[in-house]
């Protein structure tokens, strides 16, 4: 309010827009500003982030929004949902996501924040019973590993076989330097592209995410697909098969249908294509963790009964409540089971690792 010189409703996009763009006359550096359907300048977070350096009020608004979300979604919402025993119970749906992932609701425990310091404080509210510990096991870089094994791309497979840092290794290949010469910025770009490729990101999205000109983004994409020709071929094949059959399948045979591929609207088709590229990878990972849950539970029933409980599944991560004195024997067993759902023969030598 002191920045604005007046009190206003921070939650009202209309009032916020008037304060920022009329009263304080904040201008975008590049002149590219999104407008809402009613023609007002957008106050969406992604737009405000671009204006962060234009006025100190922007930083305050972003911080206010983060705190308001943490309050509304977690701090005020979760305590009334606690059971008499102080436990929080979610409802999982096996068919909650089209890719085969679990979803979680009332409350969504797969969505506890981690990125910011304030968000991490919310995580610290979750504690184990006395004498027990919470132990989390998660598949490391699983979708990139699955991309390597499903596409049988030799260069990508070799990076994982050699135990290299995948983002640095990809950066070295793309920028034509040795891994020792890869800078922080090169690695960051490679990481954006690595994950972008998994989600079928095109040149425009890449341009925005890397904050570069379109021609430069196109050059990165071309170079990536030249370098990893096996992955490029796999993506083209996946798109073509999905268009022909109307669905994709995971390694284990789960199908996902894409009616949007037949749409006459180009953006609907493009969106369906992006989802079709990602579905076999995300779906295979979802199948794997479900199989792992069955196997680990068998191990708990036979060897760790009463000492270990599986309490949460968060897509590529399993969380257990473990007796303090059982952790040393349980951890290596659970890790081994999770890592061997697919054999090395099946993955073409790509190691599946759990941290």
Image (cartoon, rainbow, N blue to C red):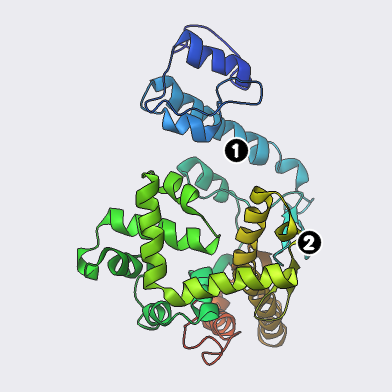
Comparing 165 with 2, the one in front is 165
Is mark 2 in CB contact (under 8 Å) with mark 1? no
Instruction: Name the N-terminal-most of marks 2 and 1.
Output: 1
Q: What label sits on residue 186 in the rendered view?
A: none
Q: Within the image, what quadrant is residue 184 found in?
A: bottom left
Residue 196 appears in the figure = yes
Point out residue 309 in the picture as x, y percentages from the top left corner. 68, 71
Residue at the front extreme, as displayed = 264
Query: Image point 43% across, 81% down: which residue?
Result: 157
Which numbered mark, 2 or 1, is in the foreground of this view? 2
SS at circle 1: helix
Q: Within the image, what quadrant is residue 305 found in?
A: bottom right
- Depicted 344 relative to depicted 25: above or below: below
Figure label count: 2
Say few, some or many: other residues with alpha carbon within 10 Å of mark 1 (under 14 / 14 to 19 / 20 or more): some
Say few, some or many: other residues with alpha carbon within 10 Å of mark 2 (under 14 / 14 to 19 / 20 or more): few
User: Residue 173 vs residue 60: left or right?
Assistant: left
The residue wearing badge 2 is: 93
Query: Image point 60% across, 66% down: which residue?
Result: 277
Distance from Cα at disc 2 to Cα at disc 1: 24 Å
Point out residue 259 in the picture as x, y percentages from the top left corner. 77, 60
Point out residue 103 in the picture as x, y percentages from the top left corner. 72, 58
User: Residue 350 vs residue 190: left or right?
Assistant: right
Comparing 326 with 232, the one in front is 232
Residue 280 appears in the figure = no
- Depicted 225 relative to depicted 10: above or below: below
Point out residue 316 in the picture as x, y percentages from the top left corner. 59, 67
The residue wearing badge 1 is: 70
Query: Image point 64% across, 38% down: which residue?
Result: 75
User: Residue 222 vs residue 323: left or right?
Assistant: left
Residue at the bottom extreme, as displayed = 345
């Amino acid at each position: 309010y002191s920045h604005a010189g007046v009190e206003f409703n921070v939650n009202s996009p209309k009032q916020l827009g008037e304060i920022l763009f009329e009263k304080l006359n904040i201008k975008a550096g590049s002149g590219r500003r999104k407008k809402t359907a009613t023609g007002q300048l957008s106050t969406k977070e992604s737009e405000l982030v671009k204006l962060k350096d234009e006025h100190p009020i922007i930083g305050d608004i972003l911080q206010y929004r983060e705190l308001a979300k943490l309050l509304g979604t977690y701090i005020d919402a979760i305590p009334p949902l606690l059971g008499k025993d102080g436990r929080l119970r979610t409802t999982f749906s096996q068919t909650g996501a089209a890719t085969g992932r679990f979803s979680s609701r009332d409350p969504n425990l797969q969505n506890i924040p981690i990125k910011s310091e304030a968000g991490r404080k919310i995580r610290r509210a979750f504690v184990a019973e006395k004498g027990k510990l919470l132990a989390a096991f998660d598949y490391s870089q699983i979708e990139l590993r699955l991309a390597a094994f499903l596409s049988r791309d030799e260069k990508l497979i070799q990076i994982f076989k050699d135990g290299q840092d995948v983002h640095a290794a990809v950066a070295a290949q793309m920028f034509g330097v040795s891994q020792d010469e890869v800078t922080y910025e090169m690695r960051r770009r490679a990481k954006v592209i690595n994950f972008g490729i998994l989600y079928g990101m095109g040149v425009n999205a890449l341009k925005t995410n890397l904050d570069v000109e379109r021609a430069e983004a196109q050059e990165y994409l071309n170079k990536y697909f030249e370098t990893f020709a096996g992955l490029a071929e796999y993506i083209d094949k996946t798109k073509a098969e999905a268009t022909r059959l109307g669905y994709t399948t995971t390694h284990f045979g789960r199908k996902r249908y894409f009616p949007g591929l037949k749409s006459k609207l180009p953006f609907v088709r493009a969106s369906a294509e992006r989802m079709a590229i990602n579905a076999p990878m995300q779906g295979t990972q979802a199948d794997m963790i479900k199989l792992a849950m069955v196997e680990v539970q068998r191990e708990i029933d036979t060897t760790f009964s009463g000492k270990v409980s599986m309490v949460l599944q968060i897509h590529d991560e399993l969380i257990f409540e473990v007796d303090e004195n059982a952790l040393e024997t349980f951890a290596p067993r659970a890790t081994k089971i999770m890592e061997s759902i697919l054999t090395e023969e099946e993955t073409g030598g790509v190691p599946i690792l759990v941290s």
